[in-house]
Image (tube, rainbow, N blue to C red):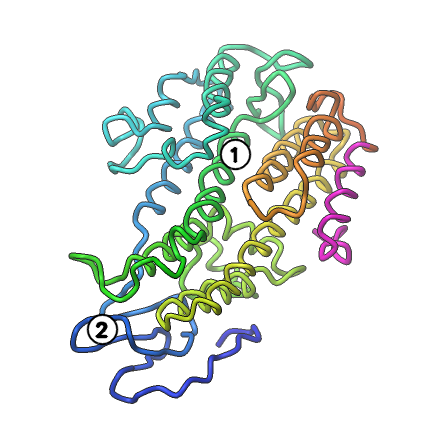
Amino acid sequence: MHSSNRTQLLITVPLLAIALLISSCDISDSDGDNNSTIEPPENYEFTRDGESTVAYPGQTDRLDMVEEMKEYIATAHGGATLYEQALNDMFKNTNGDGGGNFSFTSDRDLKSKTFKPDLDNNLFKDFFAKAAAASENGEASNGVPGLLPRGDGHILVDAKGREFTQLVEKGLMGAVFYNQIFNAYLTDEKIGPDVENSETEEGANYTTKEHHFDEAFGYFNAPADFESDWPDSRKGELRFWSKYSNGSDAQLGFNDTIMDAFIQGRTAIVNNNQDKLNDQVDVLYDSLELLAAATAVHYINSTISNFNNTGEAFHALSEAWAFVNALKYSPNRKITNQQIDQILNTDFGENGNFWKAKKEGLNNAKSTLIETYPDLEPVQDQL
């Protein structure tokens, strides 16, 4: 059983219209229409006629793509040369296999789902070109991209000291995953009152509205039974945003809060309860934004703790940079663009140059985040 204080919807249910399973809800009727009423299940598991209605293969493919892009860039840490074309092919998914660079095939891609202003500004295209060029250099220094010692190995950094694996991996977590959750799948266009929710899609066991909400969940990509106090033995099942949710769960209870909202929201869709759905969407906007801010504070703390160890400090600050940058993708964000710019381009070093970062600036960035997100104040030093 979950340790959260999840509240069950107390609804009178026609006995012949529903079979409430142990961990999932089944909606069945003679026409296949979505007109039954259910209570929220314990896990993110929904069925109709005994078959799952949850599917998000495209999101899983894109998470796999980001993982393999990061792995490719990390080969430069051991001295391998990176190729700009290979990174662009992976971003566009050329020929369905990233130009031969993916270990799998898919008809999905990352580029078409990337935040359009980032595409227009060539954010990732520039990262790819600079990473490839840096991989042909030797040791990095202020203004010179290349390899920077970290622990027993190295990291590949740009001229400002930012680690390329973090800029690309965490950058795409924001520009694709968060962007799609916030600006596509949780919008009225995808899950509003006018979206089809009475008939299942042809050849599928879900309605269009159900599927859109599931795709938002797919970018969070947690196990169906994800919860607070997640066991260490199952941490390998977490990746990207669900992994970072778990990382701050002890302080802020993100796992239960976010999963509750996804489960309650999906239940509201089944029950055609738009007001309840809108309430849960509000929770998701707030909680996912807070998660990015909390993770940024965590990495600012790590940077300060490792300030005299350049490799460790720049690794942590690269992560902090990406998580602060991820805040911009929420249209409901509490932080302003000016505050984000101040943190990234002044507090993290003059003109965003990590080599010029000072503890005073790092503490100022932390203070801005704490003031903007007061829920972080009691745990700011434990993150």
Quadrant position of residue 13: bottom left
- Residue bearing mark 1: 171
All told, the count of numbered labels is 2
Q: State yes or no: discs 2 and 1 in contact (Cβ < 8 Å).
A: no
Quadrant position of residue 207: bottom left
Q: Nearer the viewer, residue 302 or 352?
A: 352
Image location (x, y in percent) of residue 32: 19, 71
Image location (x, y in percent) of residue 262: 46, 62
Residue that protrudes farthest toward the front in the picture: 194
Residue 376 colored in magenta in the image:
yes
Residue 276 in the image: above or below residue 240:
below
Which amino acid type is shown beneath numbered disc 1? Gly
Which residue range is magenta in the image? 361-383
- Residue bearing mark 2: 50
What residue is drawn where x is 48% and y is 60%? 233
Residue 202 in the image: above or below residue 46:
above
| Main secondary structure along the magenta-highlighted residues | helix
